[in-house]
């Protein structure tokens, strides 16, 4: 058995109190009939060769130590073939319904859903959705797993320090080590404070109607475009999408253009944790400069903010802060997750919406005899964000995905239509 890193344990614990499963969508050309047994067998064979999909979790009593990764086998219900939903809109509705059954409910860490014979204007497709626990990895790690399922190279196994085998013994040891761990966390916290420098990130703004709790409603929409159309003014894909969001979000949310901002998910490579976390990301506030009407200038300003945020992610102060967080005793880290979920709604927010952007590589994947056409993803909603965006590219196709809940979902079709016009 191996110990979960604190970052991965936080994602595992968060799943107890919030919906945080990831849903990775891959659309393949539907080249003809394939039996359910053939599709299930193809995925199960590939899953058997992916180390990340051979894992289970063993918890420690009282969360007195971090959970353990334990060996597991591919479950009998790991692959589900659904009836054909008909058209693309109906398929998205069916996928939205999947979010109402989180993996925590039966203790699994992943499941694959297959929808065949989905009609689209550009030809029929077969849709495969990888539903995966956030504990298994962030967007980049989950993408590597998804690629491996459909013909790509498996991700490198993530090793970690060996754990105490007996759960009760681990709990006793964890309780004894609370004091030393607190001392270490305090030392790292002081180091983080000493290394801290002023950071010019986007200032908090007043919440909009997209910052209300979404309840249980989920509406999914997608907009798939050639990569060149997304690279507004030659900017990188993520910056191009943010530049276009600035044209649409203020009017959609009835908010001031000068306050337009998003929470952007950024990955980083070195987090100072010797337990090799699978989740290496943070969210940062990025101003959209919607009051700047010249798109080239706006893209330049947004690009500078994103580049600065990436630089800060690897700074000495951020590294020290992550080390301090990773040094906290497991019991306190678990309690912090629970308390965070129960805290009151904030008076200000870092961004009106969340944007997660991942490049899923070359369009060299296949399933059921068909090649991949596009990919999409739907970042989870939260009690402070009822509107999220995914930006996912594979080959030359980039899909902007929208997930909306609560009242903000009432006019989501108008919003996506406005986005399409803005990209045109």
Image: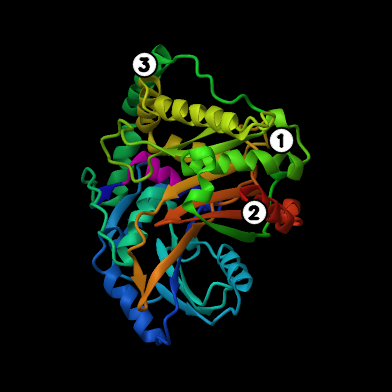
Query: Disc 3 to disc 1, how far (Cα)?
Result: 33 Å
- Please, is residue 213 above or below residue 286 in the view? below
Position in image of residue 186 (x %, y %): 38, 20
Between the residue at mark 1 and the residue at mark 2, the CA separation in whole angstroms equals: 25 Å
Residue 266 % position (x, y): 45, 38
One can see residue 162 in this view: yes
Picture quadrant of residue 286: top right
- Crowding around mark 3 (Cα neighbors within 10 Å: few <14, some 14 to 19, many 20+) is some
| Residue 65, numbered label | none
State which tag comes first along the sequence, 1 or 2.
Answer: 1
Query: Label 1, on which residue?
Result: 207
Region rendered in magenta: 4-11
- Which residue does the image show at 46% across and 25% down from the upper left? 308
Answer with the quarter of the image where residue 212 lies: top right
Marks 3 and 2, how far apart at CA: 47 Å
Say what secondary structure mark 3 lies in.
helix
Q: Is residue 177 left or right of residue 91?
A: left
200 lies above or below 97? above
Vertical placement of residue 209 versus 48, above or below? above
> For mark 1, does the 10 Å Cα neighbourhood hold few (<14), some (14 to 19), or many (20 or more) residues?
many
**Drawn side of residue 261 relative to residue 367, left or right:** right
Q: Nearer the viewer, residue 21 or 35?
A: 35
Q: Residue furthest top?
A: 194
Residue indicated by mark 2: 420
Q: Position of residue 166 (x, y in %)?
A: 26, 51
Q: Which disc number belongs to residue 191?
A: 3
* Mark 3 or 2, nearer chain start: 3
Q: Could you tell which of marks 3 and 1 lies nearer the N-terminus?
A: 3
29 in magenta: no
Residue sitting at 53 percent across and 29 percent down? Answer: 300
Picture residue at 59% right of the left edge, 73% below the top: 121
Mark 2 nearby-residue class (10 Å; few <14, some 14–19, many ≥20): some
């Amino acid at each position: 058995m191996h110990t979960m890193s604190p970052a991965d344990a936080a994602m595992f614990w968060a799943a107890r109190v919030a919906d945080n499963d990831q849903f990775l969508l891959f659309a393949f050309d539907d080249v003809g009939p394939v039996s359910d047994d053939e599709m299930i067998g193809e995925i199960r064979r590939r899953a058997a060769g992916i180390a990340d999909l051979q894992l289970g979790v063993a918890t420690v009593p009282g969360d007195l130590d971090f959970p353990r990764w334990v060996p597991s086998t591919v479950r009998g219900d790991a692959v589900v073939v659904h009836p054909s939903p008909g058209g693309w809109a109906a398929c998205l509705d069916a996928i939205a319904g999947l979010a109402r059954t989180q993996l925590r409910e039966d203790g699994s860490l992943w499941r694959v859903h297959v929808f065949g014979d989905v009609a689209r204007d550009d030809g029929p497709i077969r849709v495969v959705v990888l539903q995966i626990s956030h504990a298994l990895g962030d967007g980049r790690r989950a993408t590597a797993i998804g690629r491996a399922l459909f013909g790509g190279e498996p991700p490198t196994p993530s090793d970690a320090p060996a754990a105490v085998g007996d759960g009760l013994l681990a709990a006793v040891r964890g309780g004894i080590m609370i004091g030393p761990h607190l001392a270490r966390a305090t030392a790292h916290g002081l180091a983080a404070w000493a290394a801290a420098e002023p950071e010019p990130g986007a200032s908090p703004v007043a919440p909009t109607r997209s910052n209300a709790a979404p309840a249980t409603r989920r509406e999914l929409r997608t907009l798939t475009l050639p990569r060149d159309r997304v690279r507004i003014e030659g900017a990188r894909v993520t910056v191009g999408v943010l530049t276009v969001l600035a044209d649409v979000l203020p009017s959609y949310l009835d908010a001031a253009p000068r306050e337009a901002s998003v929470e952007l998910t950024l990955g980083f490579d070195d987090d100072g944790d010797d337990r090799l976390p699978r989740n290496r990301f943070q969210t940062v506030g990025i101003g959209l400069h919607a009051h700047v009407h010249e798109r080239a200038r706006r893209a330049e300003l947004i690009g500078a903010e994103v580049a600065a945020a990436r630089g800060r992610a690897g700074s000495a102060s951020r590294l020290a802060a992550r080390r301090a967080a990773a040094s906290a005793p497991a019991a306190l880290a678990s309690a912090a997750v629970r308390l965070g979920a129960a805290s009151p709604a904030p008076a200000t927010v870092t961004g009106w919406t969340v944007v997660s952007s991942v490049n899923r590589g070359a369009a060299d994947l296949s399933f059921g005899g068909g090649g991949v056409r596009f990919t999409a993803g739907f970042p989870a909603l939260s009690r402070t964000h009822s509107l999220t965006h995914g930006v996912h590219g594979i080959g030359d196709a980039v899909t902007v995905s929208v997930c909306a809940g609560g009242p903000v979902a009432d006019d989501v079709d108008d919003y996506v239509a406005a986005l399409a016009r803005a990209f045109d």
